[in-house]
Image (tube, helix red, strand yellow):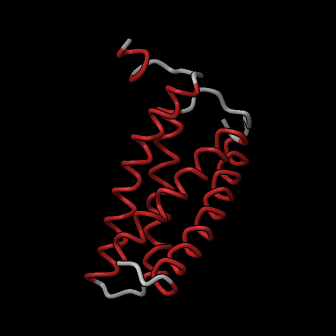
Amino acid sequence: MIKKILIFKSDNIYIQLFRYFFVGGFAFIIDFSVFLFFVEYVQVHYLIANVIAFLAGLLTNYLLSLWWVFNNRKIKVKSKELFIFIIIGVIGLFLSQFLLYIFIDILHSVITYAKIYTTLITFAWNFVARKIILF
C-alpha cells in the first residue's frame, strides 16, 4: 500500500491530491523562503518579492508534479503543456497579488500570515485547474 501511495504512478485522484499536498508543501517552503528573504533581507516591496517567490515555487511545483504527482497528461506536446501550466500559474499569481494586497493593505494582516493565507487559496486554485485542464 505504501508503494502505491508513494512510488507507483497513479491516476487515483486521492493519491494525486495526497502527493500534490506534499509537492505543494515543498513548493510553499521554496516560495515562502524566497519571499521572506527578499522582503526581510533585500528589502524588496512585498508584491515584487511575491512575484519572484511565486515563480520559484511554480518551477518547483511543475517539475515535481510531472515527476511524482500526475500520471496522465492530457496535452502531449510538452511546450504547449508548459505554456498552459504557466498560464494557470500566472492566474494564480494575479490571485496571489490581489489577495496579498487585500490582506496587507486593506485588512492590515501581518505579512507572514497574509502570505500563508494567500498561498493556501492559490494552492487550491492550482490543483483544481491543473487537474481539470492538464492532468
Residue occupying the point 67% across, 32% down: 73
> Outermost residue, front direction?
107
Vertical comparison of 70 with 37: above or below: above
Looking at the picture, tell me which residue is in the foreground, 59 or 51. Answer: 51
Q: Relative to 3, is 66 on the left or the right?
A: right
Q: Position of residue 15 (x, y in %)?
A: 49, 26
Drawn side of residue 29 relative to residue 68, left or right: left
- Residue lying at 40% horizontally and 63% vertically, measured from the top left: 116
Image quarter in which the C terminus is found: top right
x then y, percent, for residue 131: 65, 39
In the image, farthest residue toward the top? 1
Task: Classify residue 45 by image quadrant.
Answer: bottom left
Residue at the spot 49% in from the left edge and 54% down from the top edge: 59
User: Residue at (74%, 37%) from the top-left corner?
Assistant: 75
Of residues 42 and 19, which is closer to you in this image? 19
Asked where in the image residue 72 lies, by quadrant, the reply is top right
Q: Residue furthest left?
A: 41
Q: Position of residue 44 (x, y in %)?
A: 38, 86
Vertical comparison of 68 with 42: above or below? above
Above-or-below relation of 90 to 126: below
Q: Is residue 36 above or below residue 116?
A: below
Callout count: 0
Work out which quarter of the rendered image holds the N terminus and state it: top left
> Residue 95 vs residue 42: left or right?
right
Say whether residue 129 is left or right of residue 47: right
Name the residue nearer the viewer: 135 or 127.
Answer: 127
Q: Position of residue 34 (x, y in %)?
A: 35, 68
